[in-house]
Image (spheres, rainbow, N blue to C red):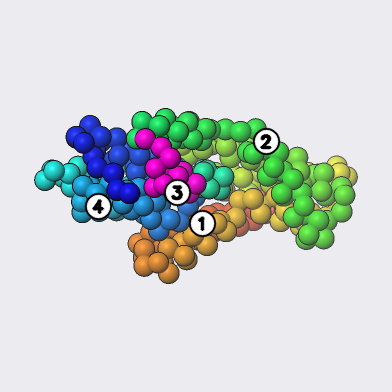
Amino acid sequence: MKRYLKNKEEAKKLMYVALCSSTIQVVSGAEIYRADKTIQKIFSLYENAKNVQTYLLSNVVHISFEFQGENIQAFRRIPMTYIDLGKIDQINTFSRDFVNEKYTLDEAISLLNKIYSSLNENFFKDYIAPGFAGAFFSLLFGGVLNDFISTFFITSFMCGIVSKLKSFEMSFVVSNFVGAFIVSTLAIFSINIGVGVNQDSIIIGSIMVLLPGLIATNSSRDIMYEDYLTGLIGLTKAVFIAFFIAFGVGSSLKIFGG
């Protein structure tokens, strides 16, 4: 059953719901087409929300629609992304529930604000989990138990440094170069003091958490869905990230002779 917007105040609330939902998805690393479909799904519930237009990039969300002959627009810039697939799933669930009329506009806004406010630092997710991910990758690439332990601490420490750089709004180029340089330097150090065994396994395992796999995959999918500009932007970013990771590792190896 279709709903109707009663006044301009409700129209603005609906715009906020659509804008906040899509922003959370883009911030969390969702494909652009997914965020666009969420917007369209939200507006589809209201009969008198006409001519919905969207323009989304990896760092921009722009939405407009017509209500009672007036064009209502909203724009939000997204300066930085924090990969969180859990948030993407939450918004997917929310959009389905919203269309099934499980929430009023005020309830939807309250829930979205709660989800958005949880987009902050989480110690386990940001430090411990990447440490274990890198450590298990080191085993996958031929490491032993000593390499597992070394990689865990190196990766966790590196993620802490990269997180601090992001909090100062440093360029992703700088943060990835510094992260890779730290990983390689600490791997060499761990070998020299006899903690690590396989230097290559430690380095490869640690930098796996920096690699832009999700960015490259999402960009390819965006291109397939004819979001060419977004896809090319993402692929360009992935190339730069990969280059500066390699540059950071190579610089450390050249300086410290690993």
Q: What residue is shown with label 4?
A: 52
Q: Amino acid at mark 3?
A: Arg
Q: Which mark is residue 215?
A: 1
Which of the two labelled residues, at mark 3 and mark 4, occupies the earlier sequence position?
4
* Viewer-side label of 4, 2: 4
Q: How many marks?
A: 4
- Which mark sits nearer the N-terminus, 4 or 1? 4
Residue shown at 47% from the left, 52% from the top: 30
Q: Secondary structure at mark 1?
A: helix
Q: From the image, state whether disc 3 or disc 1 is nearer to you.
A: 3
- The dot on residue 124 is 2
Q: Residues within 10 Å of mark 2 (few under 14, many from 20)?
A: few
Query: What is the x, y in percent for residue 175?
Result: 54, 44
Decide which of tag 3 and tag 1 comes sooner along the chain.
Answer: 3
Q: Position of residue 72 (x, y in %)?
A: 19, 42
- The amino acid on which the numbered mark 2 sits, given as a three-letter code, is Phe
Q: CA distance from mark 4 to mark 1?
A: 28 Å
Tell me which segment is drawn in magenta. Answer: 91-104
Residue farthest toward the bottom in the current orientation of the protein: 224
Kindly report the secondary structure that dominates the magenta region of the rendered protein.
Answer: helix
Of marks 4 and 2, which one's residue comes earlier in the chain? 4
> Which mark, by number, is residue 96?
3
